[in-house]
Image: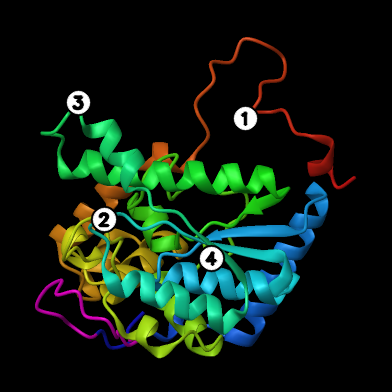
């Protein structure tokens, strides 16, 4: 844990981040093999081989789509572009670029009419409410298309986002299969280079693009490279706070991240069910297919 850590003056939304800690380096060839096998085997268990991916033009969805194509072939993957009127022009352009590169079929659905109709009666709705509505509108579309095509929705949330709760419940956090959910953002970036995701996508600042000028790092108040290292040592390696402090992590940052992870636990689990029977869904009941049959 004594590896040098690159310090930053703050979350400036920088696009390219180095992996300062060797512990966060991945073998992209091996990881790609694991993730494509995961997509193939889990799809097969459901009886569905088609996959649907929401393409935002960002790094995570580009990597998820690239893995989906490697797993099932480009004819079996549908990319869905769902811009809002305030979406960045680059987002749409990069999503189209990725789709052309992967040679996948796409559908483009403008969510502006649906979202604006909903907020017509609440014109003073906060930016957060509007962002959540956009995210859930997109997921509603993805699941509708997945039903129409007998396909599975592929998730695009990385481990950093999942641990920090940086996502919308029943929105972008929803999926049937998530191939990148156990990779930190900086690891997704390594995989993107290996998968030859177009450079303009890899080089731009990460953004949910829910309002003009938004970047993930500004909203989180954290630089991904630093957050990933702390999350890894704090949760993957279960390092005591004393050792984290000795390695140079600020006490305030440690406690802030730990509290954020604690408060967002509800986003990482199924709805709580009060137990009154011998076998309760989500607690001690499993479907036969999860027994390995």
Mark-to-mark CA distance, 2 and 3 = 18 Å
* Residue with the mark numbered 1: 282
Q: Is residue 34 visible?
A: no
For the residue pair 235 and 273, the one nearer the viewer reads as 273
| Residue 222 higher or lower than 2, as above or below | above
Nearer mark to the viewer, of 2 and 1: 2
Numbered range of the magenta stretch: 6-20
Determine whether, in the image, residue 186 is placed left or right of residue 77: left
Quadrant position of residue 39: bottom right
Marked residue nearer the N-terminal end (1 or 4): 4
Mark-to-mark CA distance, 1 and 4 = 23 Å
Q: Are marks 1 and 4 in contact (CB under 8 Å)?
A: no
Few, some or many residues within 10 Å of mark 2 (<14, 14–19, 20+): few
Mark number displayed over residue 85: 2
Mark 2, secondary structure of its residue:
loop
| Residue 90 higher or lower than 180, as above or below | below
For the residue pair 249 and 114, the one nearer the viewer reads as 114
Question: Main SS type for the magenta part?
Answer: loop
């Amino acid at each position: 844990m004594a590896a040098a850590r690159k310090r930053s003056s703050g979350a400036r939304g920088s696009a390219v981040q180095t992996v300062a800690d060797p512990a966060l380096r991945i073998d992209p060839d091996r990881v790609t093999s694991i993730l494509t096998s995961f997509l193939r085997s889990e799809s097969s268990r459901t009886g569905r081989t088609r996959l649907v991916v929401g393409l935002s033009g960002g790094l995570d969805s580009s990597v998820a789509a690239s893995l989906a194509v490697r797993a099932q072939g480009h004819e079996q993957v549908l990319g869905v572009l769902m811009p809002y009127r305030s979406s960045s022009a680059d987002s749409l352009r990069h999503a189209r670029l990725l789709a052309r590169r992967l040679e996948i079929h796409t559908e483009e659905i403008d969510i502006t009419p649906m979202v604006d109709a909903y907020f017509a009666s609440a014109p003073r709705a906060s930016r957060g409410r509007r962002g959540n509505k956009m995210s859930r509108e997109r997921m509603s579309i993805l699941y509708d298309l997945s039903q129409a095509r007998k396909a599975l929705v592929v998730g695009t949330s990385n481990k950093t986002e999942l641990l920090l709760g940086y996502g919308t419940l029943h929105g972008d956090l929803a999926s049937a299969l998530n191939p990148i959910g156990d990779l930190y953002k900086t690891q997704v970036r390594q995989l993107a280079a290996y998968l030859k995701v177009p450079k303009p996508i890899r080089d731009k600042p990460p953004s949910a693009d829910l309002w003009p000028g938004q970047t993930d790092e500004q909203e989180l108040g954290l630089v991904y490279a630093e957050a990933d290292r702390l999350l890894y040592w704090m949760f993957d390696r279960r390092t005591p706070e004393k050792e984290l402090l000795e390695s140079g992590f600020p006490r305030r940052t440690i406690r802030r991240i730990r509290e954020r992870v604690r408060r967002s636990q509800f986003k990482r689990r199924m709805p709580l069910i009060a137990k009154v029977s011998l076998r309760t869904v989500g607690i001690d009941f499993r479907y036969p297919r999860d027994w390995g049959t």
